[in-house]
Amino acid sequence: MTYLASKYGTNYSLYPKDVQKKAIVDQRLFFDMEIIFQPFKDYFLPLVLKKGHDEVKFQEIPRNLPFLEKILENSEFVAGDSITIADVALVTTVSNYEVVGVDLSKFPNIHRWYTTCQKILPGYDEINLKGTVELKELWEDLKSK
């Protein structure tokens, strides 16, 4: 995503040229991969590999959401006051959380941010919503086995 934004992007607010602003976006992308997405992956990958539903791992999925809640406490988006590719990445992960039933209303800042991203990200419904519907069907099928 960073490569594509750097090479083809014309909207530098999505992936800033300013080194300090870019570093914040990069940090949030790493935060998504290592902190927010990881518990979901730890639960979902074994499920896909037919190892069955693991309730302990399932309950661990939202364990790191308080960190994201704190990040969003003082800014509209995850890397500041304008939307970036970090928001694009994180909104996808958070939508996966919603698919498996994580109650985002327990996290008012995340809920506000998530709702805003759904409304303003171009093509959100076409790109993300279709995938979440398919993921939900897959999850329900795998979980029942």
Image: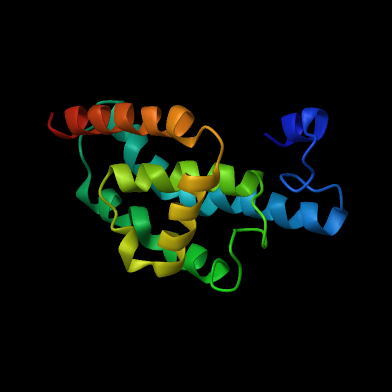
Q: Nearer the viewer, residue 13 or 70?
A: 13
Say whether residue 81 is visible. Answer: yes
Q: Position of residue 58 (x, y in %)?
A: 27, 49
Q: Position of residue 120 (x, y in %)?
A: 54, 46
Residue 102 in the figure: left or right of residue 123: left
Q: Nearer the viewer, residue 55 or 135?
A: 135
Q: Residue placed farthest to the right in the image? A: 18
* Position of 53 relative to 105 (above/below): above
Q: Quadrant of the N terminus?
A: top right
Say whether residue 33 is visible. Answer: no
* Position of 98 relative to 113 (above/below): above
Q: Quadrant of residue 8?
A: top right
Q: Quadrant of the C terminus?
A: top left
Residue 106 in the figure: left or right of residue 64: left
Q: Name the residue at 56% across, 42% down.
A: 89
Colour scheme of the rendered structure: rainbow
Residue 50 in the figure: left or right of residue 144: right
Q: Name the residue at 49% across, 54% down.
A: 116
Q: Name the residue at 33% across, 37% down.
A: 44
* Position of 24 relative to 90 (above/below): below
Q: Quadrant of residue 31?
A: bottom right
Q: Give the total of numbered labels.
A: 0
Q: Nearer the viewer, residue 135 or 143?
A: 135
Residue 14 in the figure: left or right of residue 135: right
Q: Name the residue at 67% across, 62% down.
A: 80
Q: Position of residue 43 (x, y in %)?
A: 33, 42
